[in-house]
Amino acid sequence: MKLGTDSGFQKFLETVAAWMLGVLWALPLLYAAWAAFHLSADSTRFDLTAPLTWKNFVYVWRAAPFPRYFLNTFLLVSLIIVVQFTLSTLAGYAFARFRFPCKNLMFVLVLLQLMIMPDVLIIENYRTLAAMGLIDTIVAIGMPYFGSAFGIFLMRQTFKSIPKELDDAARIEGAGTMLTLFKVYVPLAKPVYLAYGLVSVSYHWNNFLWPLIVTNSVSARPLTVGLQIFSSGDQGIEWSIITAATLLSAGPLLVAFLLFQRQFVQSFLRAGIR
Amino acid sequence: MKNAASDEIESPWVGWALFLPAAAFLAVFTYYPALATLYHSVFSTAKAARPARFVGLDNYTAMVQDPIFWQALKNNGWFAMGTIPASIALAIIMALLVNRALPGRALLRMSYFAPTILAMVAVANIWLFIYAPQIGLLNQVVSWFGGTPHNWLGQPDTALASVTAVAIWKEAGFFMIFYLAALQNMPANLAEAAAIEGASRWHYFWRVTFPLLMPTTLFVLVNAVVNAFRLVDHIIVMTKGGPDNASMLLLYYIYEVGFKYWDTSYAAAMSMVLLVILGAIAIGQFLILDRRTHYR
């Protein structure tokens, strides 16, 4: 099998392999979708003539406070995005364009958070938030993630690539530090904000362990925690109901992904290759 | 940090003022808790009648004598060894398969990548259904082929392997996109040259493609190792560490000790082990990245 003389048969085999793997990879999701859109009696019987139904989704929506969970998750990711964008922009600008005492040491400390992340500091962060009296609030879920090493690093790299002459020109025209940042740097970094935003939203939409620990009522619980509480209920819920709840909670992100697949993949790439 | 000094504005106050808001949150929710973990790990857990007192290394002694801790550490090792090579190998295979024109390429990429978008909780719920003892898809398939159905998550011999498979399914597609990007940046004339030389595809992959993918593999590897220790959502949903601690992972055990038994000091001692592991990965990565920059 030589490279240049790639036989048609070889290509055919590779296509078959790609498709077999593709079907295998899609199978769990398709299986979940099958169960979610069928009555529970048909959920594990693969009869193509079995009637489709929305009933499971309607049931889930009414049986548990999913509307409230959606609202909480929406508020949570919005809060995190706004704060992360602000703090990372400011700090990124500092590391990209200013010289200040202990800068290099600070930068190493920032990078350390890429490894030692809040996800593994649950015991002490719980203690801190309890001392602040913030347990069971949406703010408490977001707070450990407000300062983001990833965001600071990403904005620093982006701002560094912007020509210093633009900065100088703005300053000659009398713009101060903040005005220069918001008139020169921020507009040029739009694609990076989009990438960072998509990555951060997916991360926090899906985050589970910390919200599970820090919330204990419907008023603060995000979707992931709500889903877990709903599906692990001891009343023995049917699989078609659980899969419907699962797809419902993943729905908005999944639909967004299907619509903006390219942007999602580009964002994860941009965020990852640093 | 090779930028010309002239690109930087000498302004200690402005620099610190810009960094300060982020620094404050990093300090309170990353550096302080890391140090506080160390501090609390040498004290006893405060109880209503008895405040915390200094106990030296008692929590660590208890840890070394705790068979569940060792089981969790061992399981975490197996989980990492099971997840990482498999998901990296699959990611490379996926990337190679969809890197050329073939029917339904966009659909295939979507299929490979979709699990990445889902929450681990959602993924775990779906797989719980797949592994379900009587009616689950896996047992249905096993039955079609004449095998006997098995309680995949309920038996100690298959529980860890079953949750490992879930992690592989979730991660391979994520790693694929990095390989795909690397493959697309690979100079085309290399393949042409190899073709003229008459190199076989197998040979070409191992001699040219794989070494050129090395930086990507390192990046993916670090991510994969961190994830293996950071993510326990699927354990909470699927097995709760059971049966008989067969799928107990370190962070899940910390969570259980800290928030179910409220023995926060012991949980802090075990958190130190997790922090040391992650710190070692961080140092390793810095050293490797350092070596890589010397190449350029």
Image (cartoon, rainbow, N blue to C red):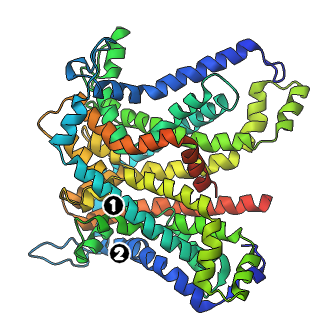
Up the image or down, B38 lies above or below B194; here it is below
Of badges 2 and 1, nearer the viewer stands 1
Residue A142 spot, x, y in % from top left? 36, 65
B266 and B120: which is toward the camera: B120
Question: Dividing the picture into quarters, in which one does residue A19 lie?
Answer: top right
Residue at image location 31% in from the left, 51% down from the top = B252
Residue occupied by mark 2: B36
Q: Which mark is residue A75?
A: 1
Question: Dividing the picture into quarters, in which one does residue B206 lie?
Answer: top right
Q: Is residue B39 left or right of residue A165?
A: left
Residue at image location 74% in from the left, 37% down from the top = B209
**Residue B131 visible:** no
Residue B134 spot, x, y in % from top left? 24, 20
Identify residue type, mark 2. Answer: Ala
Q: Secondary structure at mark 2?
A: helix
Q: Which mark is residue A230?
A: none
Q: Residues within 10 Å of mark 1 (few under 14, many from 20)?
A: some
Residue B27 spot, x, y in % from top left? 43, 77
Count the labels in the image. Answer: 2
Residue at image location 38% in from the left, 65% down from the top = A79
Give the CA distance from mark 2 to mark 1: 30 Å
Identify residue type, mark 1. Answer: Leu
